[in-house]
Image (tube, coloured by chain):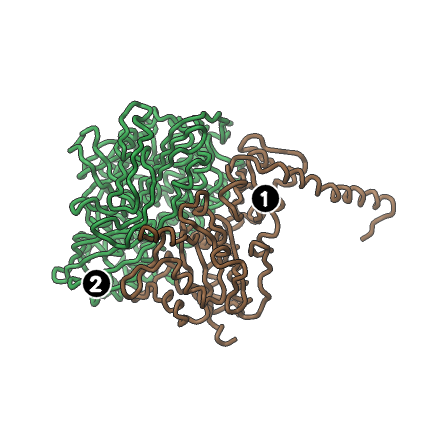
Chain colours: A green, B brown
Amino acid sequence: MSRIEGHLGIQAIADIEKKVYVEAHSFGTMFRGLEIILKNREPADAIWITQRTCGVCPTPHGLAAAMAVDMAYEALAPPMGVLLRNLLYGAEQLYDAAFGCFVLEGPDYSQMVVEKRNPNWWQAAKKEKAPHADLHGYDSIADIMTGLNPFSGSLWVRSLGVEKLGRKMASLLGGKHPHVNTLIPGGMAKTLSPTDLEQYAAMLSHHVAFAKEFVPIMNDLLDFVLSMGYEDAGLRKTNLISYGAYDDPYAYTAKYEDLADQGLKRKLLPGIVVNGELVTQDLVEINVGVREFIDRSYYSDWAVSLVDEDPKGNPIDGKHPWNKDTKPAPAAYKDWCSKYSWGSSPRWVDWKKRGDGSAHALEAGPISRMWVTAKAKNVPESTGSSLKYTLPKATVTGYKVADETEFEWKIPEKINTVERVRARVHYYAYSAYVVFGQLLQALDLVKQGRAKVWNKYKKPRDGMGVGMIEAMRGALAHWVVMKRGHIQNYQIMTPTTWNAGPRLSDTDLGPYEDAIVGTPITEAGDITGVDVVRVIRSFDPCLACCIQVYEGDRKILHVPMV
Amino acid sequence: MSKLEKIHVVWLPGQACTGCTVSFLNATHPSVLDLLTGFIPQAAGVTLDYHATIMLPCGGEGLGAVKAAEKGELGPFVLVLEGAIPDEAIAKKSGGYWCVIGENEDGKPVTFNERLDRLARNAVAIVAAGTCASFGGIPSGRPNPTGAKGALDYFGRNWKSALGIPIVNVPGCPTMGEHLAETLAHVVLSVRGYLPLPDLDKEHRPKWLFGHTAHENCPRAGLFGDGKNSHEFGEPYCMGLLGCKGPISHCDIPKRGYVDGVGGCPSVGSPCIGCTQPGFPDRPYSPFLQKAPASFFVMEKIHSIPGSLEAVWGRIKETLVGRDI
C-alpha cells in the first residue's frame, strides 16, 4: 500500500456475489523499538527521540513528550511558551491536514483512479456541475477529480506549496520540520523576535485564503461521492476518542491534579464517545481507562507493575501504559489465529461505569476531535450539533475569496469514509481559525511585556508524567516513569495504534478491520481493492501498506495501493 | 550514454519514519518537481518509479517497479534508501521479522533486507537519505534492540556500484530537502559523466554540504567569539552552555535555514543535537541538553590564536607599509 506513512498490511475477504467485504485483518510490518531505546536515557531526550516515531506528524509527539516531561520535572512553561508551542503545533496541523487530503487520500478520488475503477462515477462527474464553482473555479466534479491527479493536477500541485508553507511556519518557530528542535521542558528554546510573529501571520494568511476554496471544493466532491452510494463504505459505530489540543496558556500548570481542568479549557476538547454518547471529558478519567493489549501482537506479556495508582489516587491497571513493558517477540507472518501484527490493541475501559462498564475499541482522528468539540459546548464555536466559526478577511494574490467567511461543520449521522475525509477538511479550516486566535493572544502577551518563553526548573530525582494531545491522525499520548533522574519506562500510544490495531477476538475487531467489514464493492471489472484502500486512507494511516484481497475462492490478488 | 537517457529512482523505506520523504518535499531550489521535470538538459529524464508514500501507480503496479529493478529489468536506477537496516537474523531466531515489504509470488513475506540486497546489485548508485539510512540513526540507539545499522556498515565502506560509485550519505534527522535534491541531481550528472563524482568526506557525506561544522556555519558563532553565551533559553547568544553540539556536528543548516531559507536549529535558539553524525542519538550527542565536551571549545580557542594574531598583524602592517592589495 502506498500513500500512507509506514508499513501496513491489510488483508480483506470479499463476498463477490453480494459485492461486499466480509472479513479483514490489519497488520503492522515494521518494528524499531523506540520505547526500548528510550529506557535509561534522560527523560528530556524523549522530546527529540519520540518525534522520530513519525516524520509526517512529529510535533504532537514532541509536545506530548514535553508535557509528560514537564509533569515529571515539575517544569512549568510560561504563557508565551505555551502559546508558541500551540503556534508550532498549529503550523504542523495546517501542513498535515492538507497533505492528508491531497497527497495521501485525494488521489483515490482523482480522474486517474475514478475513470478506471468507477467508470459510472466518472460519467456522472462529467455531467455534474460543482455547486460551489463560484467560490473555487472548478466547473464540474470531473474538473475537481482531474485537479487531484498526482504530479499533474492543479489542486495536487498547488497543495504542495500550501503544505510546505505549514512546514515553513513550523521551521520558523521550531528551527526545522520534520522533527522540530525547540520544544524543551519548561517552555521553548526559541529566541522570539517581532519578525517571527509577523512572518508567521503573513504565512497564515495564505492558509486562511486557501481554506476558503478548499472547503467548498471538497464538500462538492464528497457530496458527489456520497450520492454515488458510498454511505456504507467504512461505516463504523460512533465510538470515538479525543484528547484535545491547544492548551490555554493560563490553565496549563504541568500538574496531574489540574489535568481535568486543563483539558476542558482547550480549543479542541477531550472526550470519549461510546455508541454516539459523550461518556466523559475528564482527561484523568480518560487516562486511567486506557489499556494496551498484546494478545494478537508480536510482544511478550509483562509481569511487573511499576505504578499502582496515579497522583490522584486512582487505581492504575496492569495493562495501563504506565505499567506496560515493551518486550518484542517476532513471530510468523500472517498467522491469523495467533499473533499477526507489530501494532497492539488499545482499548478504553469505562472504569467509572458511566455506561456498560466494558472495554471499547475507539476510533481516533479529526472526526473524533471535531465531533467532541462540536458536541461539548465548552467553546463558543460549539453549538451542540455543529462547529460554527468565521475565518478572518485575508487578501492574498491568487485566491478567489478575501472576505470573512463563516463555516459550519455539522456532526454527521454516520461515521464513514466520506465523513472522515470531510472532518479532516474542516479541521484544516478550523485549525487556521484557532491558530489565528492564538496568534492574536501571543501579540497581546508581547504588548504586556510577557514574552518570556522558558522557565528554569529543578529536576527532581523521581517523577511520572503523561502528555495527551491530538496528533493529525488523532489521540496521542506519552507516559513516562522517571527513577533516579532517568527513564524507567516510556510508552507511546499513537492514534494509528488505536485505529490499526489487530482484533482481540472475532467479535472485537480493531477499527480498520471493523470499518472494512460491510464496505460495498463499487469498482468495475477485476477487484483491485480500491474501496478497501479508500476506507483505510480515510483514517489517514501512519504506516506503509500493502494490500491483498482474497476473493471468495481464496485466490490471492496482489493489490498495490492505487 | 544513450542507455542513461532515462534514469529511474527507486525509493525504498526500511526502519523509517517517513520524515526524510516529507523533508524532501521541503526542497525549494531545486524542488522535487524541478528534479522530475529536468530544467537542465543534462539532468532531464529522471523518473520516480517507486515511492510508497507519494506515488500513484495507476493500474495495479504497486511493487512492480521494485520487482523489475530487482530483476534488472527497470533500466538504470538510483536506489534511495530511507530508514535503517535491521538485523533480521535476530528476529528469525523466534521465527519472525522486523521489517517486511510485500510478498513473493508464492505469498512468502519479503524482508526489506532481501529487497535491498537484490536492488543493490543492479543500482547505478545508492544514496542514503537521512541519518538512519546512512549510519543507523535513531533505531540504532543503544541498546539497539533490532540490530539496526546504516548502509555504510551494512554494505561495507568499500562497496561500489557497477559504475564505480560509492555509497553517498545525505544524513540529517531527517535529511534536509535541498541537501537530498542537490545530491541526487549531482549523482545523476555524475552517472552520466557530466560531473566528477561528488567530493565526499570520510563518512561519505558530500563535502560542499557537510564540510564544516554547524558551529562554523552558525550565525551565533561570532557572538561566541566575542564571549557572549546564552544562559537561559530565549537569549540570542551562543547556545554552547545550553547543550549545543554544533562544534562536533557537520551541517550547514544554521547558515542556509531549513525550509526555503527559514529556520536553522541554533539560529532560532535551540541546541544542535548532532543529528547528522554517526553515533547519533548516543553519547556525546545525548543527553541533548548536556554541554558538548569542553575540549572542543578549548581547541577552537587555541586554533583561533594564529588567525587572531594574523588579523592584528595585518592591520599593523597596513599602517606601517601600506596596503598590499
- Residue A460 seen in the figure: yes
Q: Which part of the image, by quadrant, shows the C terminus of chain A?
A: bottom left
Using residue B262 as the reference point, say whether residue B15 is left or right of it: left
Q: Is residue A308 left or right of residue B43?
A: left
Q: Quadrant of residue A353?
A: top left
Q: Residues within 10 Å of mark 2 (few under 14, many from 20)?
A: some
Of A384 and B195, the residue lying toward us: B195
Residue located farthest toward the bottom when viewing the structure as drawn: B2
Query: Secondary structure beneath disc 1?
Result: helix
Category of crowding for the residue at label 1, using alpha-carbon neighbours closer than 10 angstroms: few (below 14), some (14–19), many (at least 20)? many
Question: Can you give x and y, in whole percent of width and height, for residue A237 in the image?
Answer: 18, 44
* Up-down relation of residue A343 to residue A274 (above or below): below
Quadrant in which residue A527 is drawn: bottom left
- Disc 2 marks which amino acid? Glu
How far across and down, in percent of the image, does residue A424 sit?
31, 47
In depth, the one of B262 and A479 nearer the eye is: A479
What type is the residue that disc 1 sits on? Ile
Q: Give the letter of the chain under mark 1.
A: B
Residue sitting at the far front? B93
Q: Which residue is mark 1?
A: B248
Return the x and y of residue A2 as percentages of the image width and height. Answer: 34, 57
Query: From the viewer's perspective, is B247 left or right of B46?
Result: right
Q: Secondary structure at mark 2?
A: loop
Is residue A139 depicted above or below A497 in this figure?
below
Distance Cα–Cα, label 2 vs label 1 = 56 Å
Residue for badge 2: A523
Is residue A148 visible to us here? no
Residue occupying image coordinates x 46% and y 32%: A185
Q: In the rendered structure, the residue with mark 2 lies on which chain? A: A
Which quarter of the rendered picture does the N terminus of chain A lie within?
Answer: bottom left
Q: Position of residue A366 (x, y in %)?
A: 30, 43
